[in-house]
Amino acid sequence: MDEMMSTENMEEVRVLEAQIERLQAEVEALQCQQQNNNKDITLQLRGKMKDAMSYLCGQTQGELEEKVMSQLKEEVEELEEDLKQQTQMNGICLNSCITKTLQSGSKVVQQLCVSGQCAELVFQVEFQLSEVKEGQQSERTISGLNVVMDNSDPQNFSSFLSGVEERSDLLLFFRTLRTFSDRCDDRGRTFKHFKEKYPSVVSFPGGSRSEVMALNHPELPGCVLFVHWSVEVSCEGEVTPKVGLLTKIPEEALQLFPFQSLGGAAEAFQSLLRILGPEAAVESVIRAISLSQES
Amino acid sequence: MKNKCTFFSLFTTLLNFCVSSAELTVLILPQNLQKLRASMDKQCSQEEEEEEEEEKMDDDSENSQLLQLMARHTQLKDLLHAHHIIGTMFKYQGKGLCASLTTAYEGVYLETYNVEIDLKPRLRISRHNVPPFIPLSSLAEQSNMQTDIRSFLDTLSKHLNAFAGRKQQLKLVKELHKSVEVLESNVLCSVLVMLLTLPGEKSTVLCTLNYTDHTRLLPSGVHFECKDKALPDAPEWKKNCSLLMETPVHKALMTMKKNETIL
């Protein structure tokens, strides 16, 4: 019994010893990587950050920790303010930017992964950024662009996104994203305005951020006019809102009431759109429905 | 010495954790195992003692505060750098707003244009380095700069990027296609006249590209002129026409060379 136990123990001792060796090797490798990372970081640091790093590495004599801290804090506060202003003016909020340096020297190559949002549209872009310094001038190039959007409207963007990725057109992507977001906001504001003004007529079958606003006739259930307001994005990044009117009238109603005018309602609405613009056109349609109720 | 311990303590903790989890798997504790554990515990306690001698609790937390601040600094710098790459940068300076508009074509970053806008008493462009053939003031009026600065700057960016893109396409045509002679181009790069050489008889075709929409990188009109009046209606040349309408000129010329319709 004792013999069996001791062989088992010997085994476990060996296993644990091997584990410890592996862990020690891992620790050594990590320490080496840490040293390399530190070297990379210190080479790129300037100003207050360099001071702070020097302090941490014990390379500065007699520097008060508070002084280093307060100077760095001031700079950080300035940067926070800059970022806030930038986000506000740009309309694009960047939440994280992960940079991996693949190559350094006269040609610096970095892999960047930037994620953020524009209003409610969440995105993540990944690309390689190379910078070549030639004397005073430096040339920057982007390649391998990959864009991912967490979006409920994939059809709108898919052809545009593939074009953008092919041409590495990061600037166009963000400009278009912003314009698209603005047009969607226009739609949302207009829909909300009509809902507040005509609560009994207006409803949103697809939710408040949907493309469709339903106008229900107060007296005739089943007779609905749909305002379809889509925001389309072309391959070249042109953002076009398209507003159209669709009618849903049950057969019985068409027989009982001479709704001849509603037959050509879609085309008539397009003419109204051209003259009055989307909001006024929709307003006239709603008024028309409500009026017929009164009469 | 301080920093070495700060960084090394992290790894010691890691090592400790791994060792203690290994310990948990051992249910029976014979002598050999105990010896091994004892020597390891001795090592760890030695290091802990060193740390306690050199550092106090306050120093540790202050160092970590500094590290946190440094991390935030790097993060902010990275985010601002990213903003710079993805488009327009804004900076409030004095009584105005300074906007830097980045331009790029096919991933290559080109010129940056700066526009300074005074905010009071009303919005007014005070300084800029936008070339004169870009109609700054009429763009400002058209896009309601007074009420929507961002819309104006987006429109301006569209024009500038399209101009930079057309200029770059012209540069690539000159670099990559030595057999194509560029006869005429204007500063806005909205008109391009090239002389294309046909294979065989060495006769030429005059090709005119008109970019009437200045926000686009592709032409709105392509026109061929040749001694042989029937050439523009030939099927390969009708194809060439659509090629030039749908692909950037330097790429279209590459395809035309591959198809052997030009030299």
Image: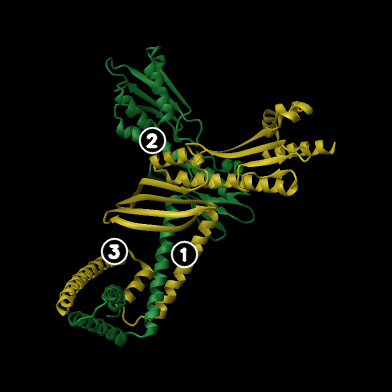
Chain colours: A yellow, B green
Nearer the camera: disc 1 or disc 3: 3
Q: CA distance from mark 2 to mark 1?
A: 38 Å
Q: Where residue A121 sits in the image (x, y, percent)?
A: 52, 50
Front disc: 2 or 1: 1
Task: Tell me the CA gap for discs 2 and 3.
Answer: 38 Å
Query: Which type of secondary structure does the marked residue at label 2 adopt?
Result: helix
Amino acid, disc 3:
Asp
From the image, which quarter does the N terminus of chain A lie in? bottom left
Closest to the observer: B129 or A23?
Answer: A23
Q: Nearer the viewer, mark 2 or mark 3?
A: 3
Q: Position of residue A263 (x, y in %)?
A: 71, 27
One can see residue A208 in this view: yes
Q: Which residue is mark 2?
A: B169
On the image, the x and y values in percent for residue A159 come to 46, 37
Q: For this view, does B231 lie left or right of residue A156?
A: left
Q: Nearer the viewer, residue A190 or B191?
A: A190
Q: Residues within 10 Å of mark 1 (few under 14, many from 20)?
A: some
Q: Position of residue B181 (x, y in %)?
A: 33, 26
Answer whether labels 2 and 1 touch (C-beta < 8 Å).
no
Callout 2 crowding tier (Cα within 10 Å): few <14, some 14–19, many ≥20:
many
